[in-house]
Amino acid sequence: MAGAVDLSVLKERAEAQRAAASRPASDSRPGAVVLDVTELDFETEIVERSTRQLVVVDLWASWSELSTQLSPVLARLAEAAGGRWALARVDVDTNPRIAQAFGAQSVPTVIALIGGRPVAMFEGPQPEEQIRGWIDEIFAKAGHLLPETAATASDDEPEQDPRMAAAEELMNSGDLDGALAAYRAIAELEPDNVEAKSVVRNLEFVTRAQAHDPEIVNTAAPGDVDAQLAAADVLLLGQRPEAAFDRIIELVKVTRDDDRTRARARLLELFELFDPAEPFVTAARRKLATALY
């Protein structure tokens, strides 16, 4: 796994904010069945709403002829359903992180969510009757997860989140940049997603460590902050955590002010890659405390 970190999906929110400002106010009313959703209200109008009712997400683009065919069909079905489910329309051009979080490879892509988790999806336009049957099947198979029937829920494990599965597949295939971008998108949209945040930390470390020359371990000068931090990365990547931590602790001892702060911050960052109960982590924390005080 090699290559620079791909930050292309972490765009500014300016366009999303403009889209939210121009969206009709009626879209956000509690009883709305067709909503135009942006990155700003993703949590409220898609994730949280799906804990109360089925939410069907339509990932579309204005330049996609197939999107213009499918979106009106979905809207018509949502209106006809009388509030049984809600349609959340997402313009992928102005909200790229939502599409990335769902692992969408093309538009239009349609994802159904219940209880905050995707339960089904399809790509491309479908006949109206087929979509109606698709929705009925979702209620038949996963409707018990909705509040009104939650008491009859089974003990089966929930299906794996397709977004996490897609990101994991990218990582397993060696596309580190793509996996990092996918996990970052999920983590930013869902700040409480511990798994996604953990994978982001690990991938960011691996990307940074692989960019260093391994010889830095032997050539780094004692007081050279950048070189010693790079050497610690290389040691940790080589499965030598104690040696990596000791490098930075020694750096803390011989530096002052901003340099010492940088060294301490990097060491705490590396601690986050491990279970805090690991003996070598607890030992390093004690050494750090001694070095600081």
Image (cartoon, rainbow, N blue to C red):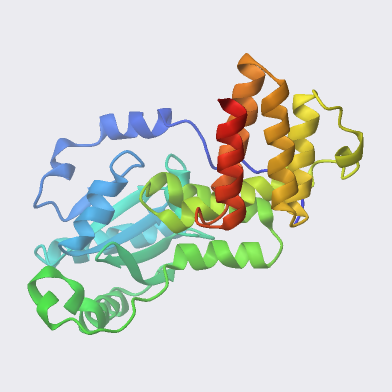
- Observer able to see residue 255: yes
Q: Look at 43% across and 39% down and name the residue there.
A: 94
Q: Look at 27% across and 31% down and name the residue there.
A: 22
Query: In the visual, does 10 lie left or right of 250?
Result: left
Q: Within the image, what quadrant is residue 135 found in? A: bottom left
Q: Look at 39% across and 70% down and name the residue there.
A: 121
Q: Is residue 102 above or below residue 134?
A: above
Q: Is residue 254 above or below residue 183?
A: above
The residue nearer to you, when weighing 242 against 14, is 242
Where is residue 219? Give x, y as percent: 91, 34
Q: Look at 53% across and 65% down and name the residue there.
A: 166
The residue nearer to you, when weighing 213 against 280, is 280
Q: Within the image, what quadrant is residue 162 found in? A: bottom left
Where is residue 170? Give x, y as percent: 62, 63
Numbered circles on residues, count: 0
Where is residue 117? Give x, y as percent: 32, 65
| Quarter occupied by the N terminus | bottom right
Query: In the visual, does 274 lie left or right of 51?
Result: right
Q: Is residue 281 above or below residue 160?
A: above
| Quarter occupied by the C terminus | top right
- Observer able to see residue 3: no
Where is residue 274? Give x, y as percent: 56, 54
